[in-house]
Amino acid sequence: MLKHEIISGKANSKAELFIDCGQEPEVQIRGPRVDAMIAEIEGNNFTPTIEIMSKRDLKFEKKSGVLFSLGRPFLTSNPKPVSVQSTENGLLLELPQNKKK
């Protein structure tokens, strides 16, 4: 393997282990980080959304309603999202209509 193949990414397919630059701490971390946020919404006839702005490779598991990054839970919500859409900057999660909290 040549130095320029590694730097350009052409050698990625030959690598035994590949970690995107900047994600090493996340891959090596022992336990998950847990944050909580509670939103109370006033009004009627609305659809709550959660906008995720990230360049990470995120995968949504519809059955559990969990968003994963690098195979680990990244975000969960209660209630579970009813749909997920890709956006230019990440993902948009749509929650059930008229859910106040």
Image: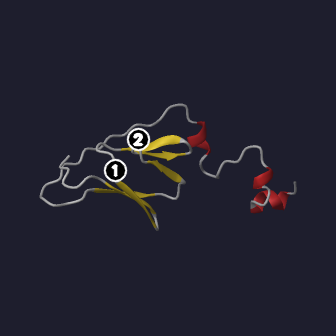
| Residue 3 location (% of width, % of height) | 84, 57
Please give the residue where the numbered disc 1 appears in the rendered image. 81
Q: Which residue is mark 2?
A: 64
- Identified at 33% across, 44% down, the residue is 77
Please state if 81 lies on the left or on the right of 27 as rendered: left
Relative placement, left or right, of 81 versus 44 is right
SS at badge 1? loop
Q: Quadrant of residue 66?
A: top left
Is residue 22 toward the left or the right of residue 5 in the image? left
Q: Residue furthest left?
A: 43
- The relative height of residue 54 versus residue 33 in the rendered view (above or below) is below
- Could you tell me residue 42's position as x and y percent? 13, 55
Instruction: State the CA–CA distance, disc 1 to disc 2.
Output: 10 Å
- In this view, which residue lies farthest toward the right? 1
Q: Please state which of residues 46 and 69 is positioned toward the viewer in this rendering.
A: 46
* Mark 1 burial class by Cα count in 10 Å: few <14, some 14-19, many 20+: many
- Type of amino acid at the residue the image marks with label 1: Pro
* Residue 14 in the image, given as x and y percentages of width and height: 80, 51
Q: Nearer the viewer, residue 87 or 35?
A: 87
Q: Are marks 1 and 2 in contact (CB under 8 Å)?
A: no
The residue that appears at 39% across and 45% down in the rendered structure is: 65
Q: Amino acid at mark 2?
A: Ser
Residue at x 75%, y 54% (from the top left corner):
12
Give the quarter of the figure containing the N terminus. Answer: bottom right
- In percent of width and height, residue 87 lies at 44, 65
Image quarter for residue 27?
Answer: top right
